[in-house]
Image (cartoon, rainbow, N blue to C red):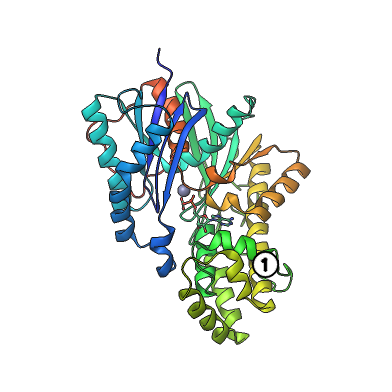
Amino acid sequence: MTNGHILGIETSCDETAAAVVRAGEQVLSNVVASQIATHWPYGGVVPELASREHLRAIVPVVRRALEEAGQSYHSVDAIAVTQGPGLAGALLVGVSYAKALAFALDKPLIAVNHLEGHIHAVLLEERQRGNREIGFPVLALVVSGGHTHLYLAEQRERGWTYENVGQTRDDAAGEAFDKVAKLLALGYPGGPVIDELSKHGSTDAVNFPPAHIKGRSRPGRSRRRVGADTPGMTFDFSYSGIKTAVLRYTETHNMQAAIEQRRRALAAMKSPKADDVLKLCDRQTLDLVASFQRAMVADLVGKTLHAAGELDAATLFVTGGVAANSELRQAFEREAAGAGLPVYFPSRPLSTDNAAMIAAAAYPKFLAGDFAGPELSAEASLPLK
Ligand code: KG4
Ligand code: ZN
């Protein structure tokens, strides 16, 4: 029996990442090449540039991950890669490279869903801490730049199963952070800078009404029909309204000139940090940002805990880039404790995109012999099941 050393490769969005993880729980290396500097001037990810940067970075990033793990191309037991969801051209780079590597080395190839990866980032670190007593079902909130999805997750004999019980109807939560940062000229990505700036503003200065989701939820397959006994209530999310409300606020409060001034000042800087942005923000902007973040956090926490109660979840996972948000973590910890529900997050480096989570999610598939064939293709809208 091997030790289950899996080389994970992740290229779904704007990070080229490779990692070696042993037995789904010991991270031997975790290399992430960020493309933030490439996309920064555009205030968001430019898909064509992302593919080009992945092509440039993939070989050195994989080589470094193997070196740091004390492994070689030949010593790893399997190669795992993100199949989707994500940007088609970006995914293609990782999938083609992983397929070529697996074929040339005659190693098993394992296809991993990116969202499953985010969920396994939590499991990986809980196992590292010696926590093997996770109660089921787990309700996992995957909250990132591309997703705000709720899954009921269970471990079965031949691996994990996931049931989608809620999702955003329009923008993802991370997308709302990024778009609000862009329209206020705070830089990219928006989440980390808004997280920092919010500490300096008043959270109740601007009132954002909660998003109303029309219609009942889609029929669920779970033991209790999703939201069936609460007409009009669903576990879906919606964040395009709050982004528009922020824009409206800047227009009705004559903030445009100050925003343009900040945009020019930041464009002249090499790679501005949150502190540089802070110096360019007046009280009105800081209050707006802090109130926006508070409203986002209240909505994410409120809807997730409501779903957890309705679905009798035993454990809560909060994962994905937005799970790095400090106010979100505090609010979840406080509210989940109040509801008597254990809540787990990945550490901050494993909250945002990385390949350790891909290698960890691949391990149960490795044990089950669930391998991909040479026909494996990248799937931009791959659902998690
Ligand atoms: O998981 P991730 O790295 O990539 C995707 O799969 O999308 O998530 C990136 C998203 C971005 O929208 C970014 O603004 C957000 O996560 N993010 C945060 C924080 N750190 C990253 N959002 C709020 N607070 C943060 N501290
Ligand atoms: Zn992600």
The amino acid marked with disc number 1 is: Ala
Picture quadrant where residue 101 is located = top left
Residue pushed farthest top? Answer: 1
Give the residue drawn at x 53%, y 63%. Answer: 190
| Position of residue 102 measured from the top left corner of the image (x, y, whole percent) | 26, 30
Give the residue drawn at x 67%, y 49%. Answer: 329
Picture quadrant where residue 215 is located = bottom right
Camera-side residue: 252 or 46?
46
| Position of residue 20 measured from the top left corner of the image (x, y, whole percent) | 42, 31
Q: As displayed, is residue 355 above or below residue 156?
A: below
- Quadrant containing the N terminus is top left
| Position of residue 76 measured from the top left corner of the image (x, y, whole percent) | 36, 25
113 relative position to 298: left or right: left
Camera-side residue: 208 or 21?
21
159 relative position to 245: left or right: left
The answer to whether any part of residue 82 appears in the image is: no
Q: As displayed, is residue 283 above or below residue 161?
A: below
> How many numbered discs sit on the rendered protein?
1
The answer to whether any part of residue 63 appears in the image is: yes
Give the residue drawn at x 62%, y 76%. Answer: 281
Q: Badge 1, how many Cα within 10 Å: few under 14, some, many 20+?
A: many
270 relative position to 290: left or right: left
Give the residue at mark 1.
290
Helix, strand or loop status at disc 1: helix
Camera-side residue: 33 or 195?
33
- Quadrant containing the C terminus is top left
| Position of residue 218 measured from the top left corner of the image (x, y, whole percent) | 50, 50
CB at disc 1 and ligand 1 closer than 8 Å: no
